[in-house]
Image (cartoon, grey):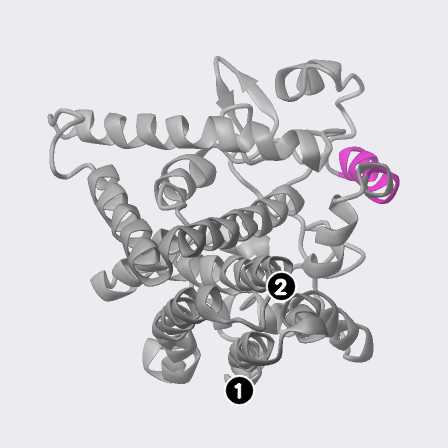
Amino acid sequence: MSRLPSALPFWLSLCLPPLAVLGMVFGGWTIALLPLSTWWLFTLLDAVTTPNRENPDPQTDDSALLWHRAVTLVWFPVQFTLLLAMLWYVPRAAHLGTGESIGLFFGMGVLSGTIGINYAHELMHQKSRLERLLADLLLATVLYSHFRSEHLRVHHVHVGTPRDPVTARYNEGFHRFFPRVLRQCPPSAWRAEAAMLARRGLPWWHRANPFWRYGALQAAMLALALALGGRSGLGLFLVQACAAIWQLELVNYIEHYGLTRRHLGAAKYEHVLPHHSWNAEHRASNWLLINLQRHSDHHYKPDRRFPLLQTYPKAQAPQLPFGYPLMAMAAMVPPLWKRVMNPRVKAWRKRHYPDITDWHPYNKALNPVA
């Protein structure tokens, strides 16, 4: 086991909000600084830093993780304050044109999707009521509150099977995946929560259904956007939310593309194993994404805090050729993505399931057009 990694590099995300402020004040080319830094700066840092294959002691006590946890705790007030400032300032800024305003809120969405939703993902897996509340607040700022229910009650249970909407099917391009997920995930999350309530002997309309909380928080955000920025502010807020959701689903697309669990018959599947998630050992993008790229271990121990997530050798868990930021850009060009990833999926099949010679039944179940 290696020593616990320093918390400081994970705080690099706090260098990004000032770029949004620069864009607000100066406009012009400066509005591109935020999205370009999020995508390309950390990709460049990945190229000049060495891969991180060190594993800290997973039994490290929470008391040693104070500064690691703190970055996820302070992010909501930072993001919320920045968003409110933009909603008030940008619609009134005479020096900003319509295109610049939209560009600013697109960049804000890249930030709230790449950092905000990712931190919400870390927080929702913890037992602390404060951390779960912060997760709900972060998701409400991008109008995607159902993600908590979908992720905890559907994705972690059914990943790699036809019952998980966000497991990207083999040969399914992102531009088909995205609308399918937007269509399938909310009702899937609702059904999962209704089933959970039914097991407790409660009806779906009971106040314990988190969808009432989700709706109230999202309505409050929409009202706040309208109050601060008027109709134009509300429109810009929606631009931000759409960009954030797009960023999240790009990551979801990457994480399990083409990876399926063995069907055991009678609607049963093998347990989730390390080889059912794509991983990346790239150091800088793991700083940005608080080790989300150690995704196999996250599925093994969902409540394990991000500094303690373990990496696996290539023989146990498939590795991506680049970090998530660059892979996300490749996913936007389906022919390029398939050229890079489809041979890797086929090699994965030969390595882990050499006895399965006919994948058509799996492809048909997961992707009728594959």
Residue 82 in the image: above or below residue 133: below
Nearer the observer: mark 1 or 2; the answer is: 2
Residue type at numbered disc 2: Glu
Q: CA distance from mark 1 to mark 2?
A: 33 Å
Q: Residues within 10 Å of mark 2 (few under 14, many from 20)?
A: many
Determine if the magenta segment contains residue 307: no
Residue extent of the magenta highlight: 338-351
Residue type at numbered disc 1: Leu
Q: Position of residue 293 (x, y in %)?
A: 62, 59
Residue 264 in the image: above or below residue 259: above
Q: Residues within 10 Å of mark 1 (few under 14, many from 20)?
A: few
Q: Residue at x 56, y 60 (%)?
A: 114
Q: Which residue is mark 1?
A: 8
Q: Position of residue 41 (x, y in %)?
A: 72, 74
Give the quarter of the image for residue 196: top left
In the rendered view of the protein, which quadrant contains the C terminus?
top right
